[in-house]
Image (cartoon, helix red, strand yellow):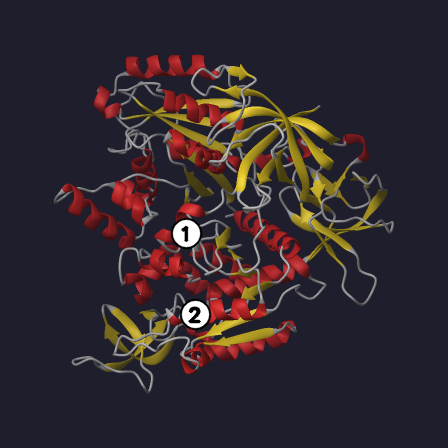
Amino acid sequence: MTLDLLRFTTAGSVDDGKSTLIGRLLYDSKQVFEDQLEHVEQASERRGGEGSLDLALLTDGLRAEREQGITIDVAYRYFATARRRFIIADCPGHRQYTRNMVTGASTADVSVVLLDARRGVLEQSKRHAFISALLGIPEMVVAINKMDLVEYSRERYEELVEEFSGFAAKLSAVKHITFIPISALNGDNVVELSELTPWYDGPALLEHLEQVEVAYDHPNEKPARFPVQWVIRPASGDYRGYSGQLASGALRRGEEIAVLPGGGRSRIAAIDTYDGELEEAMAPMSLTLRLEDELDISRGELICHPDEAPAVAREFEADICWMTDELLRPGSRYVLKQTSRSVTAVIDRIEDLIDVHTLERMPAPQELGLNDIGRVHLRTSAPLVFDPYTSNRRTGSFILIDESSNATVGAGMIAVAA
Amino acid sequence: MSVAARPQLSHLRALESEAIHVMREVAAEFERPVLLFSGGKDSIVLLRLAEKAFRPAPFPFPLMHVDTGHNFPEVIEYRDRRVAELGERLIVASVQESIDNGRAVEETGPRASRNRLQTVTLLDAIAEHDFDAAFGGARRDEERARAKERILSFRDDFGQWDPKNQRPELWNLYNGRVHRGEHARVFPLSNWTELDVWEYIDQEQLEVPSIYFAHERPVFRRDGMLYAWREDTELIDGEEVFDATVRYRTVGDMSCTGGVESLAATLEEVVTEIAATRITERGETRADDRVSEAAMEDRKKDGYF
């Protein structure tokens, strides 16, 4: 049977039981290997005494983390069921690791936000939900955990659903929110439906994850965006192909296309892959295009349908998550990379700073610091070809790179041309 | 909530597309990449991905094998044949030469292995050829210290990996900027599992060295694993050599790779066996990971693959 691929993030603080949840998902769906379990059993007993099994240890990999007992970086875990192949981006919950949460969320199709049924909707939970929405994850699952500690109370569950829903009403990027009462520790409603929550008529978490829609299920609903990554031109012969990965939408042989920002027009003569020519290709396939006309297209340009073109601009506003100790200030200059295109960018103004607790935008801060998120006005040395991030996560996103240290210092999401 | 319809793209095709994208990005953003080819299954998949990414042109980089001198002969034979088939350039960096030049010191004793010595040879070769990016077949599911590895992993001018200092990797935007003397390791198979690799080999009908399939060979049991017996193997008291039908799940150096008893003699049988397996690939067969809980992490800090 053909499986498809789903990426989801898990977010929650160290006490919410997020690592236990992942351990439980892997353990109950029989994806944990015996030797991994043995390692964890031994480590659990060393720390917690005989008989203890800390499933959270399945996901802590680095020495420093094991010593401190926390997760300090995004960890990727893999498992599959009969229906679907999963990639989990397990993100740390501490405020100072916002940058890692943003990282893990950037490629996710689903966000799993954990609430501790006893402690309720904490600032951490709101921040995680907010970041998931900011990063454009369309589907959210709120797993209300530790139901065992509130006696599987329906009232408590519904109280939390209402409170979270009130908060989440502001998160417009999220298309659906699903609530599930679980106990990661005891396994209720994680893989198997629990008898202890008879009032709950939804699916268990894993079943929901197996069914939820993946980002690319409807490629024709989005305009075609083909950033040219690489040009294939063997030394001998006439072959000239433009290679890349379709960022969104679909392309067909014979269709008319436009090239931006250059402005050329042509028709698709062939869609090549190593396995042969295709009549049609859809995102996220990697392919090579041959065009009827001899245009001179280079890496960094974008091919699209002429009537569905993206924006082209050198000035725009974007939300930026700042990821380094050095401060972001007006006048700062960086390398900006968006799709396959790199330009120089200058920060003109910092418009606001988002308070992730209240979701209020506070106007005109002096600077952005590590883990801050704010709206910034930028100018680039050459035009960018883009869509607003809320329309297209691939063409609306960019990174900022420090020219001297080469570090990735910021993650950006374009709001609008300015 | 809408229920997903029939999948447009299988997970293997989605993973393949991502890997091709990574390879093209690196080819475009770096000046002198190299593809580390060991003849093992992961690097075999990398070669096919390179074909898919760059054909009909030649690869924009050479292949390199860090040869410990203790490889399975079947793997060397396979390596040479495959490279000839592809018509690509192969550089062989020799650990033996590093030892002869005094750059690396041979381990002694029955548990000696050239596994750690590869790091010296690898880093010297990277410096000699001035490579700024090296493709490797490592996956994140292989081992705990790799779960946090980036697809593009930054190594300083000593070839060292600092887990606290890796760059955030967002969307599919890779930051490939390095200073002179530094390089990036690139892992296009980061999101692939062992099973994905085998299913892909099956899908593409790729040839792999015969030792991946069940065959008979003289072995001895040590530390709960089955090692291949070579002429110059130093046995410990009480160890006996016997013939067994084994196959290899991973192909490292002969001195540190254990085989598993298996009758899986075809690709299909191997895939079925792996799908049912309960022990990770490396846990079952790699002595180099067992040295300590943090063995891989320590080796990576020193500049290992």
* A394 lies left or right of A302: left
Give the residue drawn at x 43%, y 60%: B271
- Which chain is disc 1 placed on? B
Q: Position of residue A8 (x, y in %)?
A: 46, 36
Q: Which residue is mark 1?
A: B162
Give amino acid for label 1. Asp
Quadrant of the drawing holding the C terminus of chain B: bottom left
Give the residue drawn at x 19%, y 50%: A42
> Could you say which is closer to the camera, residue A4 or residue A319?
A319
Q: Position of residue A132 (x, y in %)?
A: 48, 28
Q: Disc 1 and disc 2: Cα gap in Å?
A: 17 Å
Q: Which residue is mark 2?
A: B120
Give the residue drawn at x 32%, y 70%: B258
Q: Position of residue A341 (x, y in %)?
A: 68, 43
Query: Dot 2: what SS?
Result: helix
Give the residue drawn at x 36%, y 30%: A12
Q: Quadrant of residue A15?
A: top left
Give amino acid for label 2. Val
Q: Earlier in the sequence, mark 1 or mark 2?
A: 2
